[in-house]
Image (cartoon, helix red, strand yellow):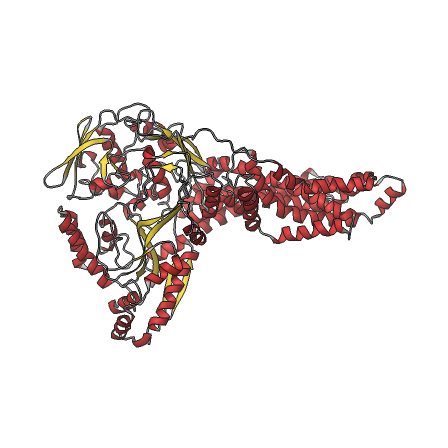
Amino acid sequence: MSFGSWRLTLCTVSTLLFLSVSTLIPLSTAESAVPQVLNLGNGGEPKDLDPHTVTGVPEFHIIMNIFEGLVSKDPKNLEPIPGVAEKWKVSKDGKTYTFFLRKNAKWSQGDPVTASDFIYSWIRLLKPETASEYAYQGFYIKNGKAFNEGKLTDPNQLGLKAIDSSTLEVQLENPTPFFLSLLFHHSLYPVHKATIEKFGARWTRPENFVGNGAFTLKKWEVNRVITVAPNPFYWDKETVKLSEANFFPIDKHETEEKMFRAKSLHTVDDLPLEKLPLWQKDTTGVFKNHPYLGTYYYWFNCTKAPLNNKKVRQALTLAIDRDRIVRLVTRGGQVPATMFTPPGTGGFKPESRLPKDGSQIQKAKQLLAEAGFPNGKGLPSLEILYNTSDNHKKIAEAIQQMWRENLGISSSLFNQEWKVFLDNQQTKNYMIARAGWIADYNDPNTFLDMFVTNGGNNHSGYSNSSYDELIESAKKERNPKKRFAIFQKAEDILLEDLPVLPIYVYSRNYLLSNEVQGWHPNIEDIHPLKYISIVKK
Amino acid sequence: MGLTYILRRLLTMIPVFLLVVTLVFFMIRFAPGGPFSAEKKVPAQVLKNLEAKYHMDEPLIQQYFRYLRDLSRFDLGPSFKHSNRTVNEIIAEAFPVSMELGLISLCWALLIGISAGGLAALKPNTFYDYIPMSLSILGICLPTFVVGPVMVLIFGLWLNWLPVAGWNSWQDRLLPSLTLGFAYAAYISRLTRGGFMEIRHQDFIRTARAKGLTETQILLKHSLRGGILPVVSYLGPALAGIITGALVTETIFNIPGLGRFFIESALNRDYTVVMGTSLLYFTLIFVCNFLVDIFYVLLDPRVKYE
């Protein structure tokens, strides 16, 4: 071999080295006998794991396993089941709850969980200095709101009393029929006083952490992984099968889906929209699809012409073919929203008042003419505002087209970055704005109390005193049948006045390995790890 | 090289740094929305409590001076979003990851780029020139968000050889660093080829040949030093770019680097993290360029700074 060709070979080899290196190293895929380690894609990186300050869903997925409230939820039917409280009783007027805590409920370092732990925690939730965004979950407790707003500074005036170390008495402002269901919310979980006082904001670091759930925090590497392992002091540790669960924060659905296909994950948090049609054809049973407690809708700004005219709002709402939107645009098994509260919320099944499809277009035309805009003539161009996202855009385009074809109305689309969008929505600087509402708890109240006059989340400027009265009376009604009848009346008013344009009820689309047992798809998407195990398939 | 030059360069950094601090501070504050705006609106009282907790109830100018004062003690403040972490901690955890990814990628880029460029320059207008140069055009044109997923598809899902995402084992490093390095390798190969082509017709190379040196001796002793000069001047911006611009790669491969924090913090209006990452990136770009300028003098005797 001449020197020249040797040199060329050398160069060629080094040029192509990078290709060969990566192809020479197969990964070991050896598996031992069904390790009980669950790997989950968990959406964004959690903000914190303090039950009183977090607000997001990824946080809740973890927190519900490393803490336990007075009441838990049955993983199948979501009914309240005993948690830290073994049993409870409710007074006749529905305003006093007495909880009897189990004696063997323990923190992850061995201390017993007592009634005063709950009192400390709920005071902490309500304290102004904690600045909890979910403080309003404690407003059902007597004087909770006044205490949070600083009008009352003595925590002893809150409706909380430890009768003894394992008996907790809670007084409420109103009989709150969904109070038990509320207790599953992370804002009402207990936290460990000594740990918080010792470590301050850093108490949720794995090296400092103390919780009372079936699991405890083992590792937290930011943007990498959060690992939980069984709590050795948990009262029901026999039920726990997993030896470890890893929550991977993965922002990108595409990455998550690939990791699932490479068997690095047992489940993904969400699926990219463009992959849905492919997975819907899947026959291996890993694709899961079910309704979810949330409604996708548009706000109408009721404070500005022409949308302050009820007939215009009605015409716009009736002219939409929701069925076509879910079948052809979103394509993820969503349900056309013919009502506002998703059917089945806390057992409530609202009547359908809006057309599922385009069957009432004639009526819509007539309403628009009655409003003084026959065939859309004279109606100023409408503006639909949404936060930048392909999915929102596709839906807005479909609606824009339906309005043009069915009513002869022209409209334009505007997208804005998330925080800019929120700013404009909350200052009512819009005509029509996209929105979505996910339930805080499984009860119609979480959807319907949003529309009360000047409600913090009522961005439409809508106000109807008979509606406000209904929502107020539902808070006091204890009979579930009568209560649902009140909610139905409220729904009827809402769908007559239409400060919103309901579009569809959310659905969950995700992947779950067949190896995972004890995971029950449900409307609240709650899957306590306590009941989960892994089998070999 | 004059010591005064180095001092002067370092001193000019101070006013520029202050300008960057001021601009970033006020720009992010004037962006609509804030760290606490959310779809479920925070009650007014709670918002007040939150603002008090982060000193956001003070006048903006007072907050600005508070930030400057903390900054002078290298305290970048607490993160708004990651409430149990300070910005210093976030950077200390995430920056080494970005740095590692950047350096491995740069090694790939240099290894592939210089060998491919050198090969092309030795045999110009032949097969050995056309192939790497066509590939480099491809590398320049293909963005990482195409290269990355394609590599994952081939090596991760079809061949099942490498993990598709994560940052734990050394295998995890391969795909992302190659993805990121590929684009830079393409540039470097073209720069190398250009550099070598220019140098091979210079008088001192002819002299070397006339002295009877072998081609290898010429290559290693004379051509290489001059030929890679363009690459060196490109290295500064490349290193800064490869570390600060790894965002797409970090997202595709779910790597816990700083790029993800940078974008996420801007979207969340996590003011302190936006400030911390911007200032770090600024310093990094400055230092990289500065080092290259110094290195340049060592390689090229024609260049002198006064």
Which quadrant is the N terminus of chain A positioned in? top right
Q: Left of A439 or right of it: where is A10?
A: right
Which image quarter: residue B110?
A: top right
What residue is at 14 percent from the left and 40 percent from the top?
A95
Residue B285 in view: no
Residue B222 x/y as whole percent:
80, 41
Which one is in front, B64 or A331?
A331
Residue A368 x/y as whole percent:
28, 72
In the rendered image of this protein, does residue B148 appear above or below residue A372? Answer: above
Which one is in front, A324 or A57?
A324
Residue A422 x/y as whole percent:
36, 54
In the rendered image of this protein, does residue B182 appear above or below residue A410? Answer: above
Which quadrant is the C terminus of chain A positioned in? top left
Q: Residue furthest top?
A: A110
Q: How many marks?
A: 0
Residue B292 x/y as whole percent:
67, 42
Which one is in front, B1 or B97?
B97
What residue is at 23 percent from the left and 36 percent from the top?
A81
Which image quarter: residue B10?
A: top right
Which image quarter: residue B229?
A: top right
Which one is in front, A70 or A360?
A360
Residue B2 in view: yes
Q: Residue furthest left?
A: A92
Q: Left of B73 or right of it: where is A142?
A: left
